[in-house]
Image (spheres, grey):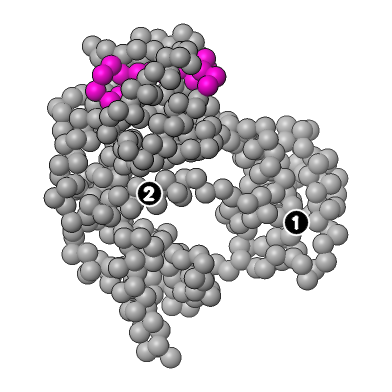
Amino acid sequence: MISYQIIQQDAQLKQLCEQARHYSVVALDTEFERVRSYYAKLGLIQIYFGADVALIDPLTITDWQPFIALLADANVLKILHASGEDIEIFHQQFQQIPTPMLDTQIMANFLGFPQSAGFALLAQHYLQVELDKKASRTDWLKRPLSERQLNYAAADVYYLLPIYQKMAAAMASSEWKTAIQQECELFAQKRCRQTSPEKAYLDIGNAWRLNRKALNNLKFLAKWRFQEGIKRNIALNFIVSSEGLVQMAIHEPVHTAQLLDLGLHPMEIKRYGKKLLLLLEQAKRVPPEQYPDLIENISERPHYKKYLNLLHKELKAMLQNKVPLQLVASKKALHQFLKWYWVGQSKQKLPDLLCGWRAVYGEKLLHSLKAAMESEN
């Protein structure tokens, strides 16, 4: 049985965080609910640095400054696993992310494990411990939390610390040590990027199919939905589906009765129908010369597949199976790289393959791509 203490008072949290800041490494995790909400709803924070595991109840704490100071303490390395949503939660709740930070899932990617290795796999490999993951999908906002939930939550950080210590030894002698550190930093930065409401329409999958007038309509609709989601903490597709917005942008309905024919749910129409129609009326006031530019789908270009395959082949030859190709550049990243090359080569917004530890590969791919395209001409 793992020994743990439950932190429910500000004074307890202050004492815990002051104690933690005397250690060089702490393990962190969170439990949360995120079903219909835009932001996750924090249910528990777990922390472990060698004493008892501490389970912090965010529903009773009011003064978070000691914890924020711990997150920001440059002398304390924070260890997390699959930290994406944890980072988002810390950034949204406290405007502070764990710094410095290492993610054991990212470390595992470089140390020969399957991509996105689960925590249970690492616990089994390094500690020969079988974890009970059945409590992971339970309600973390309900009080009191059950003994099973508390034990599950405590285990996540209790075993994370020794797992990291074993992985750190392997990382120290690895040629990928710097890459691991940079990848964790880049990952954290990406999870904190804020979408501009004005550009929310660019995140809608079929936007590239629309003409400029329809894109202008979609821009108004998507901006409103994005701001509504943040204001009311509702997941965007639970307000109005993306496909519903696209259909409205194309067909420009003027009566709520038409919305049903476009596939909107009756409840969406009841709650938001009049507002959506008003937004389309506002969009009509924009002069055509101010419509958004067309979104090019570069996969429609001639030779797209040829050049994508060239990049894939060249990168594979460079890596020589030292790390999975997917880790350096997914198909999406290669697409992004090719799009950047074709559409302006902005120095302000470099593709992932030209940033950080990947740049050494990206520069070589850029040279190969230029040579291939010049030979075509």
Mark 2 vs mark 1, foreground winner is: 2
Q: CA distance from mark 2 to mark 1?
A: 37 Å
Give how far across and how far down residue 85 sits, in percent. 45, 37
Can you say which quadrant of the picture contains the N terminus? top left
Mark 2 vs 1, N-terminal side:
2
Where are the magenta residues, as a range?
48-63
Q: Amino acid at mark 1?
A: Asn
Residue designated by label 1: 217
- Using the rendered image of the protein, determine whether residue 61 is visible from the camera's viewpoint: yes
Tell me what residue is drawn at x 40 percent, y 10 percent: 146
Per the image, is 57 magenta?
yes
User: Of residues 364 and 4, which is closer to you in this image?
Assistant: 4
- Decide whether residue 193 is among the magenta residues: no
Residue 79, above or below 351: above
Q: Nearer the viewer, residue 358 or 331?
A: 358
Task: Give me the disc on residue 185.
Answer: 2
What predominant SS class does the magenta segment belong to?
Answer: loop
Tell me whether the residue at label 2 lies in contact with that at label 1, contact meaning CB atoms closer than 8 angstroms: no
Q: Is residue 302 left or right of residue 99?
A: right
Determine the residue positioned at 48% across, 34% down.
Answer: 90
- Disc 2 element: helix
- At x 33% / y 79%, what residue is drawn? 368
Q: Alpha-carbon neighbours of circle 2 within 10 Å: few (<14), some, or many (≥20)?
A: some
Query: In this rendering, would 237 be left or right of 344?
Result: right
Q: Residue at x 18, y 60 (%)?
A: 321
Whether residue 135 is visible here, answered yes or no, is no
Image location (x, y in percent) of residue 342: 49, 75
Asked if residue 205 is positioned above or below residue 304 in the image, the reply reads: above
